[in-house]
Amino acid sequence: MIILVIPTSIILFPVRKMEARHGISVCILIQMVWWFINRFSILPGQLDGYLGFIYKELLNLIGVIPYIWIGAFICKGHLLDEIEKILQNKGIKRHKKNLVLLLIGVILFIGYTSLNKSVLIGIAGICTFFVFNLLNKPFWIENIFLCLGKHSTNIWLTHMFFYCVDPFAGLVQKGQYPLVMMLFILILTIGTSSFIKLIQRLIERGSQY
C-alpha cells in the first residue's frame, strides 16, 4: 500500500495543525463525501499500466486515511480521558458505567441497522470504539486485547494474503462460517506476526555485533 512509503511527517500533517474534535468532524465529512463519490461512480474507472496502479493506490489511500487521522486525533486530544471525566461529572458511578455504555451501544446498533446506511459507518465505528474502550473489562479480556494490540499492525498488513493472494487465496474461506473464519485468520496473522517479530529481534541482535 502506498501509505507505507509516505513519511509519517506528511501523513500526520493535518493532525498537527488541527484541534482534535474539529479534526474528527472533518474526517467524518471526508468519509461521507468519499462514500457518495464511490456510490454514484463519480470518478473514472480503472486505468492501465503503472498509471492505473498509482491511481488505484491513491483511491485506497483516500479511503483509509480518514480513519488513521481519527485514531491520531483521539490520541492527541486524550478524548477517552475526556469522556471518562464527563461520565464522572454526570454522577455516573463506576459500577453503573458499563450499564450506561452498553445501553448506548444497543441504541447505536438498533439505530444503525434500522437506517442501514453505509454512509454512517464512520460515525458508528467511532462511537463503537469509544463505547468498547470505556467499558470496564475483566483483567483477562484486557490482556487479550493488549496482546492483539502488539500484533495489530502486522495483522493489518498480512491478513489479505490469507484470503486473496496466491498461494493462500481462499484458505480462510475454508472455515465456511464467519466466526470460524475470523478466528482462523487471527491465528494465521498472529502466527505470522510472531515470526516477523522473531526475525526482527534476530536482525537487531546481529546488528549489535
Image: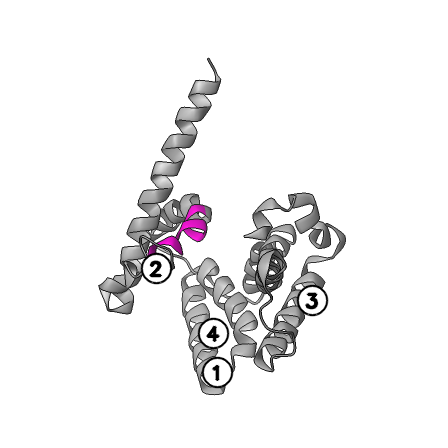
Q: Of callouts 1 and 4, which one flags the residue occurring earlier in the amino acid sequence?
A: 4
* Dot 4 crowding, Cα within 10 Å, few <14, some 14–19, many 20+: some
Question: Closer to the observer: label 3 or label 2?
Answer: 2
In contact (CB < 8 Å): disc 3 and disc 2: no
| Residue 139 position (above or below residue 34) | above
Taking depth in this image into account, of 108 and 189 the one nearest to the observer is 189
Residue holding disc 2: 163
Circle on res. 33: none
Residue holding disc 1: 111
* Dot 1 crowding, Cα within 10 Å, few <14, some 14–19, many 20+: few
| Residue 183 position (above or below residue 109) | above
Residue 64 lies in magenta, yes or no?
A: no
Residue holding disc 4: 104
Left or right? Give the position of 199 relative to 62. left
Identify the magenta region.
154-163
Q: Of callouts 3 and 1, which one flags the residue occurring earlier in the amino acid sequence?
A: 3
Left or right? Give the position of 105 relative to 35. left
Residue holding disc 3: 26
- For badge 3, the amino acid type reads Val
